[in-house]
Image (cartoon, grey):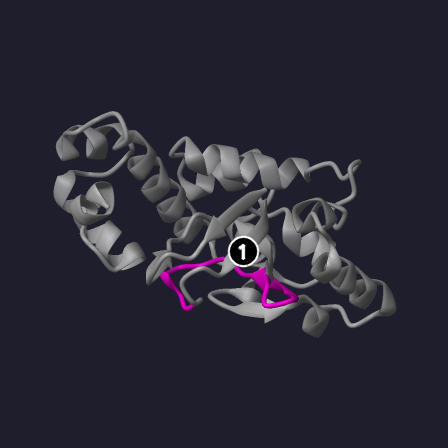
Amino acid sequence: MWRTTVTGPGDVLPDGCMDLIRMDGDVVVAGPDTRPHEVRGRAGDHYVGLRFPPGALPGLLAVPAAELRNTRVPLTELMGDDRTRAFVERVAEAADPGGALESFAPSNAAPDPRTSAIVGLLREGAAVPTVAEHVNLSERQLHRRCLRQFGYGPKTLARILRFRAALHLAESEPSGAVIAARTGYADQAHLIRETRDLAGASFAKLVSS
């Protein structure tokens, strides 16, 4: 669960996750991003969101993640049944919209073991053939599964997870060369290129902001 108040222009950066967000009296699905998403709210707007780890939300929506890539879509456009409309109304009217959002995900919903394994292995830097072998899929099957669950193929997911790991490490490690080496980049130049591609800004600017 997260809450934020808009203070000015800004970008949401790729992280592999998807969100349900209460905004402007509606519930919006934030799809998986491969580029920065500009926040266009007015200063003072307050958003509440429920973040789902990589691969968790598409199964609850019964919508392939690839169809939601780099989009923000009202939940009722994806699930137009009476139960969904009632849920959206409940969130819009709730004194605690965060608690209302949490009711969307069943408390007993267990993560899919293959999905968890794919994320874990890619986060550790495993090569795609190794991941496919570990989860008993061909590389083509793995790619299709990743499109459904994460919104993009395993190589893109690995790039995003590595990028987030680098940002996290930068909170305690000032050296770009050390960050690159410890998070799986070939060198610091590789880290800089990947950051510009995924975030549209330099790594130094992201770390200092």
Task: Locate residue 179: give its quadrant.
Answer: top left
- Identity of the residue drawn at 54% across and 61% down: 31
184 in relation to 60, above or below? above
Q: Which residues are magenta?
A: 23-40
* Residue picked out by circle 1: 47
Q: Amino acid at mark 1?
A: Tyr
- Identity of the residue drawn at 63% across and 62% down: 64
Q: Give SS at disc 1.
A: strand
Q: Nearest the camera: 138 or 20? A: 20
Residue 35 on the magenta segment:
yes
Q: Left or right: 100 with respect to 66?
A: right
Task: Locate residue 68: give its quadrant.
Answer: bottom right
- Identity of the residue drawn at 29% across and 37% down: 166
- Identity of the residue drawn at 75% across and 68% down: 79
User: Where residue 145 sits: x, y (%)?
Assistant: 59, 53
Q: Nearest the camera: 175 or 144? A: 175
Q: Left or right: 180 with respect to 93?
A: left
User: Where residue 90 sits: x, y (%)?
Assistant: 78, 59
Q: Specify whether residue 146 is in view.
A: no
